[in-house]
Amino acid sequence: MPLGANRPKKRRLKAAGWRTGSVAEFLNLTPEESALIEIKLRLSQLVKKARIRRHLSQTALAEKLGSSQSRVAKIESGDSSVSLDLLVRATFASGATRKAMARAIA
Amino acid sequence: MPLGANRPKKRRLKAAGWRTGSVAEFLNLTPEESALIEIKLRLSQLVKKARIRRHLSQTALAEKLGSSQSRVAKIESGDSSVSLDLLVRATFASGATRKAMARAIA
DNA sequence: TGAGCATATGTCAGACTTGACATATCAATC
DNA sequence: GATTGATATGTCAAGTCTGACATATGCTCA
């Protein structure tokens, strides 16, 4: 995010947690911002789905990912402290295909 | 990236610049890591293509993005200091469609 | 009830990323 | 060869993200 300019916006996001579906209208986000958030939410759902399909615990996925159970929980809950980089790595580690990922984005 | 464990790997990446196409075999990356890098490279190319198609200078795109010309240059050159978050925001700002983005990823 | 496992949430030091700036390179025009 | 506009590269203070840890909640099975 724009570092100086958008700090307040980011703070609002953090406060609201953008977990609830159509946050974009509630907060005043630019289209780009809400698109990015939507992508993140979809990926977090994909990670959870793929992990469960493979009967992995969050701890097991964390190990594959070189991370920790608590971070995986944050990944799957759509926590705003999770970067897209980490989300995508988690998506791969969970065994989801690139195709599924592309679908989540389009 | 795994923070403690993979620092050396990240350092190698930084040194090599991962610009050259099939870096993955040269450095020993996990499949997840090389997949992420490939996605980043493709998106950086997409940004450049979309920006040029719209006759925008890097400075103009930087403004839309709330960033600076030098960062846009880094985005487009596949610099390893650029996060996927920023890449995706730049992709949107450049006017590329979500479809094109999905295509770049799959 | 309680032990055991899976998941959720809060916190933080340290590692990473960012916009901004300075400066360099390159091409086109004069 | 000087000017101009676009792009590239290096640096850094300030801000963000991360793994790890502590701890809480929830569930299942004896």
Image (cartoon, coloured by chain):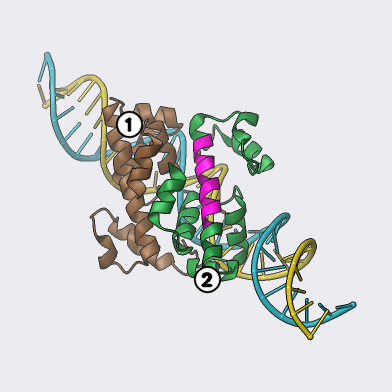
Chain colours: A green, B brown, C cyan, D yellow
Residue A46 on the magenta segment? yes
Q: Position of residue B54 (x, y in %)?
A: 30, 26
Q: Position of residue C9 (x, y in %)?
A: 71, 55
Of the two numbered discs 1 and 2 in the rendering, the one whose residue sits closer to the viewer: 2
Q: Main secondary structure of the magenta part?
A: helix
Q: Amino acid at mark 2?
A: Glu
Q: Chain of mark 1?
A: B
As drawn, B92 above or below A80: above
As drawn, B91 above or below D30: above
Viewer-proximal residue among C2 and A10: C2
Label 1 – label 2 distance at C-alpha: 40 Å
Rendered residue at 26%/66% (across/down) = B25
Q: Position of residue A37 (x, y in %)?
A: 54, 41
- Let me know if marks 1 and 2 both belong to one chain: no
Q: Which residues make up the magenta segment? A: A34-47
Q: Amino acid at mark 1?
A: Gln
Q: Which residue is mark 1?
A: B58
Looking at the rendering, in which quadrant would you find the C terminus of chain A? top left
Helix or strand or loop: what does disc 1 sit on? helix
Rendered residue at 61%/29% (across/down) = A25
- When asked about the image quadrant of residue B87, the answer is top left
Rendered residue at 50%/68% (across/down) = A66
Q: Chain of mark 2?
A: A
**Does residue B60 show up?**
yes
Total number of numbered discs in the rendering: 2
Helix or strand or loop: what does disc 2 sit on? helix
Q: Which residue is mark 2?
A: A63
